[in-house]
């Protein structure tokens, strides 16, 4: 309907022309059913306040709570543990290596001393033996000469002396003069021998630790540096994502996050980019929807205002007053339907949305709808046909809500079907057994939809935006409300092409009460 000029006042004879019928004319939105849809005076719905102040950003966390710091600490802890484990494994191995090296060196010197020394009485030792003994003592190696089962100096354990006297070699650690020392003894013929000892009071552990602390410290420092670089590298994509999320919260829908490895970071970037695109698309559709709804609300308001001003100014005489009243009533009912549809659509996702599912015979529901719609279709020259089986078609649903869906689909079809084209209401079982549920189908011979239209048929205002000014359209709420009601009732609704040449809407309803309750 063209939008009247808000400053235009009707002429002196507005009722002379054709008037809308006293009943409701085809609305721009979804027709409320007799079963009790939400009216404008029904339960109130809490709506978000436009322009409300956004929630304050979370407080800035201290440095110790950042991901970078935690990654550095964790990596440093791992490096420290690695260094400690390395030390626990390497130090004993190094100590054993040092001890084996010292033992081998002392054993070689013991063999050399045994070859050089010729055991005689101390006064008869040759000069080479004396010189070797002095050299060994300069290397902090004590030399004991065993002869006749007796050592030439005290301090050597008796067990070592007896073993040398018995002609057996000695190798290992013993207590010599009360101190732990490496002992290497070689037996000579005649119960004699030579024993070399080297004190190990400092111990190889301290020697090894003194030689390893610098490499271990260097490894720990390298781990800290690697931790810093790795933490900054890992935290950088997250910082970028946080910055992008903050910009999204501020309303910037053009923000995009660079996609970079690893895969987890790339997935996060793809998700944020998809969210930004989805938000931009959603907000664009919301703007279009608000523009469409505002236009649909303004049209009846303008007509009511124009006729009200005509009545107030006395332009409309007593004879034209009834027709003017009928026109204003029709526009008011149109406006009431729009408001009711908006309220129902807003409440559709609420937990307290009223549903009263009971066992329903869809064939009887179709017969009741036929009595209402056959006359309306006949008044505009549109054949109305009902296809129902002979047997009942059971379903478990809310009869008032499903009648609301059927009425809305029929009214949408009647709005676009030209005279002579048919409108069909069909009911059939969904399967061979009653437990499969039932199917309600509304088909028409109108202009129908393209495949692109079918993809967005149940989005609010999508078809209204496409076909406004091209053909008769409503407010764009009807199909969205129908889809929401069917979903809440545990069913499915599908848009397709009808055999009559127009659009077909197929509603599948369950026969199982459990499916209906869980969906609701």
Image: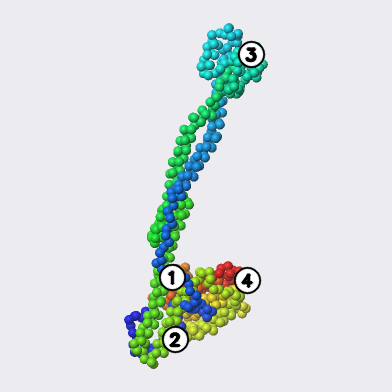
The tag earlier along the polypeptide, 4 or 1, is 4
Residue annotated with mark 3: 150
Q: Nearer the viewer, mark 1 or mark 2?
A: 2
Q: Which mark is residue 435?
A: 4
| Residue 218 drawn at (x, y percent) | 46, 35
Q: Which quadrant, please, contains the C terminus?
A: bottom right
Residue placed furthest toward the right: 166
Label 2 sits on a secondary structure element that is loop
Circle nearer the N terminus (1, 2): 2
- 107 or 162: nearer the eye? 162
Q: Earlier in the sequence, mark 1 or mark 3?
A: 3
Q: Is residue 226 left or right of residue 513?
A: left
Residue 462: give its label.
1
Q: Is 368 rendered above or below residue 117?
A: below
State the separation of the CA atoms marked 2 and 3: 140 Å
Query: How far across and down, in percent of the image, does residue 299 sit?
Result: 39, 79
Residue 159's spot in the image, x, y percent?
Answer: 65, 19
Residue 21 numbered tag: 2
Q: Secondary structure at mark 1?
A: helix
């Amino acid at each position: 309907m063209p939008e009247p000029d808000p400053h235009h006042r009707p002429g002196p004879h507005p009722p002379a022309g054709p008037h809308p019928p006293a009943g409701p004319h085809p609305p721009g939105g979804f027709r409320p059913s007799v079963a009790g849809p939400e009216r404008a005076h029904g339960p109130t719905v809490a709506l978000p306040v436009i322009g409300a102040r956004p929630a304050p950003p979370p407080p800035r966390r201290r440095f110790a709570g950042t991901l970078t710091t935690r990654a550095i600490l964790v990596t440093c802890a791992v490096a420290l543990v690695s260094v400690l484990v390395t030390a626990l494994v390497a130090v004993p191995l190094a100590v054993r290596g040092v001890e084996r090296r010292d033992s081998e060196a002392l054993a070689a010197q013991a063999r050399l001393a045994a070859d050089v020394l010729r055991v005689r009485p101390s006064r008869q030792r040759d000069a080479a033996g004396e010189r070797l003994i002095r050299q060994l003592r300069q290397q902090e190696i004590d030399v004991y000469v065993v002869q006749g089962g007796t050592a030439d100096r005290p301090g050597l354990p008796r067990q070592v002396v007896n073993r040398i006297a018995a002609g057996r070699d000695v190798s290992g650690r013993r207590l010599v003069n009360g101190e732990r020392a490496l002992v290497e003894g070689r037996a000579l013929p005649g119960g004699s021998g030579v024993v070399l000892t080297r004190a190990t009071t400092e111990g190889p552990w301290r020697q090894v630790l003194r030689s390893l602390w610098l490499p271990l410290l260097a490894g720990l420092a390298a781990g800290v540096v690697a931790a810093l670089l790795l933490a900054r590298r890992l935290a950088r994509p997250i910082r970028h994502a946080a910055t992008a999320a903050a910009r999204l919260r501020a309303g910037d829908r053009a923000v995009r996050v660079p996609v970079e490895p690893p895969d987890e970071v790339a997935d996060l970037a793809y998700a944020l980019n998809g969210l930004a695109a989805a938000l931009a698309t959603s907000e664009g559709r919301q703007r279009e929807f608000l523009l469409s709804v505002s236009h649909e609300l303004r049209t009846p308001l303008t007509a009511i205002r124009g006729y009200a001003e005509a009545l107030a100014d006395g332009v409309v005489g007593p004879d034209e007053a009834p027709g003017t009243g009928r026109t204003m009533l029709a526009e008011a009912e149109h406006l009431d339907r729009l408001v009711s549809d908006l309220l129902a659509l807003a409440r559709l996702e609420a937990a307290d949305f009223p549903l009263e599912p009971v066992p329903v015979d869809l064939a009887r529901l179709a017969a009741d709808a036929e009595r209402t719609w056959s006359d309306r279709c006949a008044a505009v020259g549109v054949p109305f046909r009902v296809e129902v089986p002979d047997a009942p078609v059971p379903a478990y649903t809310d009869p008032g809500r499903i009648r609301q869906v059927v009425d809305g689909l029929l009214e949408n079809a009647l709005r676009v079907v030209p005279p002579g084209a048919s409108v069909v209401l069909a009911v059939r079982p969904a399967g061979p057994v009653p437990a499969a549920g039932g199917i309600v189908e509304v088909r028409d011979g109108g202009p129908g939809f393209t495949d692109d239209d079918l993809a967005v048929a149940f989005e609010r205002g999508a078809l209204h935006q496409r076909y406004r000014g091209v053909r008769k359209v409503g407010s764009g709420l009807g199909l969205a409300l129908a889809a929401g009601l069917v979903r809440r009732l545990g069913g499915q609704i599908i848009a397709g092409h009808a055999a009559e040449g127009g659009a077909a809407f197929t509603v599948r309803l369950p026969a199982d009460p459990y499916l209906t309750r869980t969906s609701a």
